[in-house]
Image (cartoon, rainbow, N blue to C red):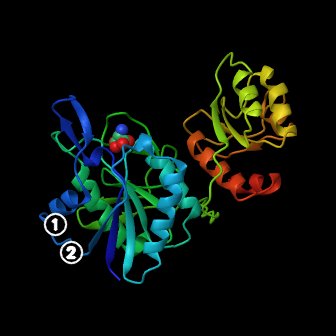
Amino acid sequence: MNKVVLIFTGGTIAMKVDQSSGGAIPTLTSDDLINTLSGLGDFNNLIAHEYSSMPSPFITPNNMRELADIVEDYLSKDDIKGVTVVHGTDVLEETAFYLNSTVKSNKPIVLTGSMKNASELGYDGLTNLVSSVKVCLSDESIGRGVLVVMNDTINSSYEVTKTHTLSLDTFKSIEFGPLGIIDQDEVIYYRNVSHFKKFSLDNKINNQTHLVKIYAGISNDYLEHLINTGAKGIVLEALGRGNVPPNLITSIDKAVKAGIHIVLVSRCFAGRVLDTYAYPGGGKDLTNHGCILGGSLNGQKARILLMLAISNNLNHNEIKKLFKI
Ligand code: ASP
């Protein structure tokens, strides 16, 4: 039981600069990448699965659903030790969180990519692939949920986010730091994620779940549009501790009464939302109107979890429990 599957979806890691268009485009196949790895050492234990060669802005929840099935299928085989999904970095955290919420296997699952394309000096793709394989092969990685491995660090899909448009050190677990590191041949974990939850939700999607970022002076137009076009769930990326301008209350009330689940998270990079403020639009007022507190998840991950919760037909109280962190 020592094989690692690399599922290639695309991203900068498989791109090179195209002279005619003057920009990076998908170029390298899974075979190209695996062959380059083989030249670097003893990597006979790798299985390549070419899922796609998409930049990650092309990835949809439907792709995530398909990937979850593929990953689960591989991990059910005795000789497979772990799976690495090779992915564009832009929405990598969403696919990682989707897999964390749906795949039931305890075996290591890693997502990785690269920030520099294969035409650039300092291409980080091969290092990240090798590190990911090492993490998959480590017994220490079992039962830690889906992991994101980039730039010699190991992060929980629950906590990690892309923080920088360019830096190789872009993936950060902002509040508590990485779970561990890859140091040459050693995979070292420094901490567990004690609030980590493996949701084991059924792998199905209903795409009527939306994310709205709140800002000073926002009008009701977005919420009214979502209510009128059949939304089933809305994540509000709210201000600070979980507050919105008071003029939104009428639409929020209307949405909740129409059976739309509303989850509150914060647009701050770190920290939980809480029903601290009782003024109109404050967290307490919002929970009184039926909004659900989304803990410390960021907007894009809360949206994935709410989408899965709604697809699994969870009711208001079950969704509340799911988000309680
Ligand atoms: N835009 C690219 C993508 O997400 C960025 C990357 O892979 O790093 O596919």
12 lies above or below 323: above
Q: Quadrant of residue 77?
A: bottom left
The residue pinned by badge 1 equals: 38
Residue 286 lies left or right of residue 309; in this view the side is: right
Instruction: Determine the residue located farthest toward the left in the rendered image.
Output: 39
Give x and y (percent) for residue 210: 65, 38
Question: Looking at numbered disc 2 in the image, what kind of residue is underneath it?
Answer: Asn
Q: From the viewer's perspective, is residue 206 above or below residue 291?
A: below
**Residue at 54%, 60% in the rendered image:** 100
State which image quarter holds ligand 1. top left
Q: Residue at x 78, y 42 (%)?
A: 260
CB atoms of marks 1 and 2 within 8 Å = yes
Quadrant placement of the N terminus: bottom left
Q: Residue 110's x, y, as percent? A: 40, 61
> Which comes before the other along the chain, label 1 or label 2?
1
Tell me the crowding category of disc 1: few under 14, some 14 to 19, or many 20 or more residues within 10 angstroms, Cα based. some
Horizontally, residue 186 falls left or right of residue 38, namely right
The image quadrant that residue 182 belongs to is bottom left
State the CA–CA distance, disc 1 to disc 2.
7 Å
Is residue 136 in view from this perspective? Answer: yes
Image spot of residue 93 (x, y percent): 47, 48
Residue type, label 1: Ser
| Image location of residue 187, percent across then percent down | 33, 66
Q: Name the residue under label 2.
A: 44
Residue at image point 14% right, 68% down: 41
Q: What element carries label 1?
A: helix
